[in-house]
Image (tube, grey):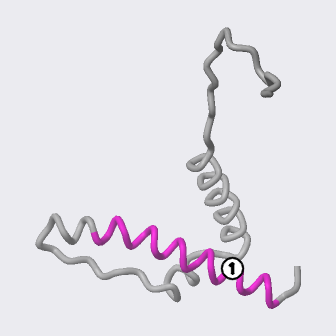
Amino acid sequence: MKSENFEMALDEVVWLLTLLANQSILICNLQNKDKKPLLTEETVELLTSPLELADYKNAIMDAMFKGTKRNVESEETDAPKNVKVE
């Protein structure tokens, strides 16, 4: 992967991690009087290493695929399939 593409991918992972982390903080702030500050992308980037971000990216992608996976079950019928229509 080119370095500019890698940097852009890491930026997107940092942005997504920050968004996900801030959702729980926002919920906590909504339910409590003690308001906690939101994380910034810079903070998340400082607290993680590029190697961790690559692992997080894989975990996020796996979760997204599992969340969108669909199991289609077809019902068995006695009607013949692929009947020629005249």
**Outermost left residue:** 33
Q: Which segment did they paint magenta?
A: 4-26
**For the stretch drawn in magenta, what is the main secondary structure?**
helix
Give how far across and how far down residue 86 sits, in percent: 80, 27
| Residue 64 x, y percent position in the rendering | 60, 55
Total numbered circles: 1
Name the spot of residue 30 as percent of width and height, x first.
19, 69
Judge whether residue 7 is colored magenta: yes
Q: Which residue is mark 1?
A: 10
Please report the residue visible at 68 percent of the width from the left and 79 percent of the height from the top.
10
Q: Answer with the quarter of the image where residue 33 lies.
A: bottom left
Residue 16 position in % (x across, y down): 54, 73
Quarter of the rendering occupied by the N terminus = bottom right
Residue occupying image coordinates x 76% and y 20%: 81
Residue kind at label 1, given as amino acid type: Leu
SS for dot 1:
helix
Against 34, residue 11 (above or below) is: below
Q: Residue furthest front?
A: 86
